[in-house]
Image (cartoon, grey):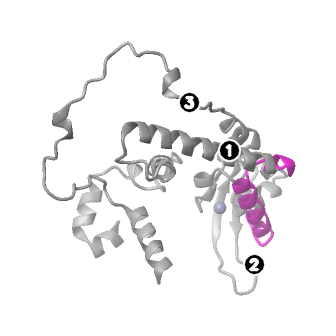
């Protein structure tokens, strides 16, 4: 907060009035609100991009088509992962393997057997940075924060769990299990029949000409609140044409 204050007092005053657990990963007790809300809505938005401002029937059709394609692609991906007989999704496997390799370079310098707490020193390789991280296996916690954020044991937790003769694979959160991924995309979609086969609706649609009138001259203003994700996509787009 002091670093923010030194750069921008107005920003500091604004943030000081908002509870820290609402906007920082370090203080949200592992709920990951930003990742689970803002990023999730951006993911859905990116899938459905281009479906805005179209007639309602076109929006419905495009939304259905995109969702069907999304599910088909992921069912194909889950099939490939099952053929490799891996326990978790590619994302979790890659992270676990990368951090397992890294854990070999660490050293457990202190430990508490009862709480399965350890102090893990990094940087045994010449030229690498030396840090000490405190790990508590019973609560799947490490001061580096990666285990809480990702739900996958970081290199320090892997190193410490081996010290306590525990299998670090058991510390990967169950939602990364391949069976969960397969179940998520197991839903089926069915084609929509042509309009002539539809049932007669029990109501009558009424056209409201007032709603279609153009109230202002010129382009409509967007109500979209721009954030850092818009900025990064703009930068990418600029980079493409440079
Ligand atoms: Zn760690």
How far, Cα to Cα, is label 1 from label 3? Answer: 17 Å
Q: Residue furthest front?
A: 196
Residue on which the image places disc 3: 192
Q: Earlier in the sequence, mark 2 or mark 1?
A: 1
Residue sitting nearer the eye, 137 or 114: 137
Residue on which the image places disc 1: 72
Whether residue 122 is in magenta: the answer is no
Residue drawn at the location 72% of the way across and 44% of the way down: 75
Residue sitting nearer the eye, 158 or 83: 83
* Mark 1, secondary structure of its residue: helix
Residue drawn at the location 49% of the way across and 20% of the way down: 198
> Residue 30 placed where, x, y %?
53, 48
Q: Residue furthest top?
A: 202
Crowd tier of the residue under label 2, counting other residues whose Cα lies within 10 Å: few below 14, some 14–19, many 20 or above: some
Residue sitting nearer the eye, 81 or 203: 203
Residue drawn at the location 56% of the way across and 30% of the way down: 192
* Mark 3, secondary structure of its residue: loop
Quadrant, the N terminus = bottom left
Q: Nearer the viewer, mark 2 or mark 1?
A: 1
Whether residue 83 is in magenta: the answer is yes
Q: Residue furthest left?
A: 216
| Residue range highlighted in magenta | 81-109
Q: Are marks 2 and 1 in contact (CB under 8 Å)?
A: no
Q: Quadrant of ligand 1?
A: bottom right
Rendered image: mark on residue 231? none
> Residue 202 placed where, x, y %?
38, 12
Crowd tier of the residue under label 1, counting other residues whose Cα lies within 10 Å: few below 14, some 14–19, many 20 or above: some
Tally of numbered tags: 3
Residue on which the image places disc 2: 124
């Amino acid at each position: 907060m002091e670093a923010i204050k030194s750069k921008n007092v107005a920003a500091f005053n604004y943030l000081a009035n908002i509870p820290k657990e609402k906007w920082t990963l370090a203080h949200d007790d592992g709920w990951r609100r930003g990742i689970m809300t803002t990023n999730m809505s951006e993911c859905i938005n990116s899938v459905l991009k281009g479906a805005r401002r179209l007639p309602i029937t076109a929006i419905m059709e495009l939304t259905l088509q995109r969702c069907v394609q999304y599910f088909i692609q992921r069912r194909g991906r889950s099939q490939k992962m099952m053929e490799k007989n891996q326990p978790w999704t590619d994302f979790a496997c890659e992270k676990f393997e990368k951090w397992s390799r890294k854990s070999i370079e660490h050293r457990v310098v202190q430990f508490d057997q009862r709480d399965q707490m350890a102090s893990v020193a990094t940087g045994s390789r010449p030229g690498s940075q030396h840090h000490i991280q405190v790990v508590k296996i019973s609560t799947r916690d490490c001061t580096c924060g990666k285990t809480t954020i990702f739900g996958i044991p970081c290199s320090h937790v892997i190193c410490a769990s081996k010290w306590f003769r525990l299998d670090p694979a058991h510390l990967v959160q169950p939602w990364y299990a391949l069976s969960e991924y397969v179940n998520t995309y197991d839903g089926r979609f069915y084609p929509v029949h042509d309009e002539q086969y539809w049932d007669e609706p029990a109501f009558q649609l009424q056209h409201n000409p007032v709603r279609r009138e153009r109230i202002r001259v010129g382009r409509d203003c967007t109500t979209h609140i721009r954030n850092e994700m818009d900025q990064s996509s703009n930068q990418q787009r600029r980079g493409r044409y440079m």
